Amino acid sequence: MTKIEITEVGDAFEVVVSDAHGQTRHSVRAGAAQLQRLAPGAPPKRVIEAAFRFLLDREAKESILTRFALADIARYFPEFERVISDYLP
């Protein structure tokens, strides 16, 4: 089972993804306006978790960039903004 731990640090989030094969660390920048646009009313950490679940469905944790902006995901995966709500817990 994959575990996603998120710590909010200003306008960034430190994310640790762990599974039986180890862990990876990531820093994600995300502004409040973007978080609300993607998932109105959802807590910021939930949006970041949903984004990582989306990414993990498409690539290994080791393939996820170590530093990126939340907006970058849609550049690599154009469907991201359309389906993110499907990943909200």
Image (cartoon, helix red, strand yellow):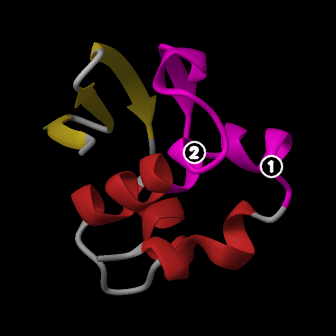
User: Which quadrant of the rendered structure holds the C terminus?
Assistant: bottom left
**Separation (CA) of disc 2 from disc 1:** 9 Å
Dot 2 amino acid type: Leu
Where's residue 40, x and y in %? Answer: 42, 85
Q: Which residue is labeled 1 in the image? A: 77
Dot 1 amino acid type: Phe
The crowd level at tag 2 (other Cα within 10 Å; few <14, some 14-19, many 20+) is some
Q: Work out whether 68 lies above or below 52.
A: above
On screen, residue 70 versus residue 49, left or right, reads right
Q: Which residue is labeled 2 in the image? A: 55
Q: Image point 53% across, 61% down: which residue? A: 34
Q: Image point 67% across, 44% down: which residue? A: 58
Q: Work out whether 28 lies above or below 57.
A: above
Snapshot quadrant of residue 43: bottom left
Residue 58 magenta-highlighted: yes
Q: Residues at badges 2 and 1 in contact (C-beta under 8 Å)?
A: yes
Mark 2: secondary structure:
helix
User: Which quadrant of the rendered structure holds the N terminus?
Assistant: top left
Q: Image point 57% across, 71% down: which residue? A: 84
Q: Work out whether 81 lies above or below 4.
A: below
The crowd level at tag 1 (other Cα within 10 Å; few <14, some 14-19, many 20+) is few
Q: Image point 22% across, 35% down: which residue? A: 10
Residue 88 magenta-highlighted: no
Snapshot quadrant of residue 23: top left
Where's residue 65, x and y in %? Answer: 57, 18
**Numbered range of the magenta stretch:** 54-78
